[in-house]
Image (cartoon, grey):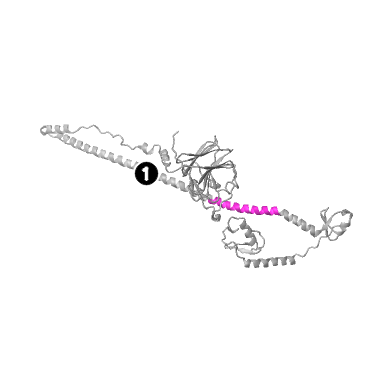
Amino acid sequence: MDFNCPVCLEVYKNPVVLSCSHSFCKACLQNWWTQKVTRECPVCKRRSSRTDPPCNLVLKNLCETFSHQLRVGQLHSQPPSPAPLCPQHKEKLQLFCVDHKQPVCLVCRDSRAHNNHRFSPIDEVAQEYKEQLQHSLEPLQDRLKRCSDVRQHWGKTSEYIQQQGQRTERLIREEFDKMRSFLQKEEQDRIRALRTEVQQKSSLMEQRVAALTQEMDALSKSIRQTEEELKSQDVMFLQKYSTTVRQVQQAPLKSVPQLPSGCLLDVAKHLGNLGFNIWKKMKDLVSYTPVLLDPNTANRPLVVSDDLCSVHCATTETADASDLPWVPDNPERFTDYVTVLAAEGFTTGLHSWEADVQEEGRWAVGVIAESAPRKGEITSGYWEIWFQDDHYTAYAPPHVDKVLQLKHRLQRIRVDLDIARKKLSFSDAQTHALIHTFLLTFTGKVFPFINTAYVNKVKICSSNFTLQLL
């Protein structure tokens, strides 16, 4: 049986047991929980609903017995070692020479080698040095503990990466399944149209062949009858000659029929620019969003949609966040602001995007400099339109904090960013009324961002696009 606590790796002291059956020193467990957001088992990460787990009395008794036997066994198995003696005088070392930094005996104290030196009792100096050494160990112990926490965090991050990969792969497959379904339906429709034309034009040709066959049968019959008259006796031939001539002359001599125009399949219609025409039709299936959100930057309560176009807050400001899914505290993630960045930043060009916003709650839309910190307070380097308590504010600390007077409530806000002129404008996307314009001061890259503490989604709108031939 293992008598060592999984946290401190020493024999259990006052062990308690969790509902998952794992046991820990009570002090170790409480110290572990104070450093975590949720009360979870340090071994299996299962959450505990109890703040004061019960004592594992059986394990406590076993550990006390084990510790006692260990102490007794050590006393019996290890005879006390003799006290070291002075190598020069063979006397017991009882003093410590402060000047020479070494233990000495009483004879050494009175010798010339230690004349006018300072001495202290061995036990006092040893205790002082032990305390100093123990104090020197504290940074190492602290670093070991922090490394242990980091290793645990990295282990959970590795699991999170696997989950990210599985989820992203599923979404990729769903997108391709959607496109495959579209292509399969398009293939079936086009083959059906082709077969319909084949059937129609084949049927038309069959009708024309039937009519021509009927005409040929009539001509053949007339020719046979005339040929039979030619073979008859002269008297009989002459008797029927007038009638035979009249029948031959009355037979219609039509022009030889030709293939009608358009009788063949319109191959160009079915096959010409097939891939391009399907590509054009796919624009109704797919959408383009000028700004996509990066879930790796989202503060923990924020939930980014699968299409990376919208975000909402999973909890209210007063709710307990302990039930939120765990996410790594990676360097890109905001920890103090309910903010998420766009996946792509801008250093040049003109950029525009629109966002559907709510008429209640709290939200902000704007841009932030790449150099702005992701952890702790942000005192400068971002420009936004902020809505809270039924007021719209243009905000860019530390210089701009202006309450805006708008004629209409915003439902969709438009953002226009001109990097060259360092100009950022906000307008009402429905009325095209200008809301506010910032003159930016930044170097490097800026990222669009959304900040929201509301359960309803703030959504980046997709843009209409057309295919153009070069």
The residue identified by callout 1 is 189
Q: Position of residue 456 (x, y in %)?
A: 48, 50
Crowd band around label 1 with a 10 angstrom C-alpha radius: few (<14), some (14–19), many (20+)? few
Q: In this view, does 233 lie to the left or right of 435?
A: left
Residue 455 against residue 290 in the figure, above or below: below
Quadrant housing residue 370 = top right
Quadrant housing residue 196 = top left
Out of 306 and 291, give the one closest to the viewer: 291
Quadrant of the image containing the C terminus: top left
Q: Position of residue 292 (x, y in %)?
A: 51, 44
Out of 240 and 334, give the one closest to the viewer: 334
Quadrant housing residue 287 = top left
Q: Residue at x 46, y 46 (%)?
A: 176
Q: In this view, does 85 lie to the left or right of 222?
A: right
Q: Which residue is drawn at 46% across and 48% down?
A: 174
Out of 56 and 429, give the one closest to the viewer: 429
Q: In this view, does 237 lie to the left or right of 435?
A: left
Q: Residue at x 14, y 32 (%)?
A: 246
Residue 248 against residue 281 in the figure, above or below: above
Residue 198, magenta (yes or no): no
Quadrant of the image containing the N terminus: bottom right
Residue 345 against residue 323 in the figure, above or below: above
Q: What stretch is highlighted in magenta?
A: 138-163
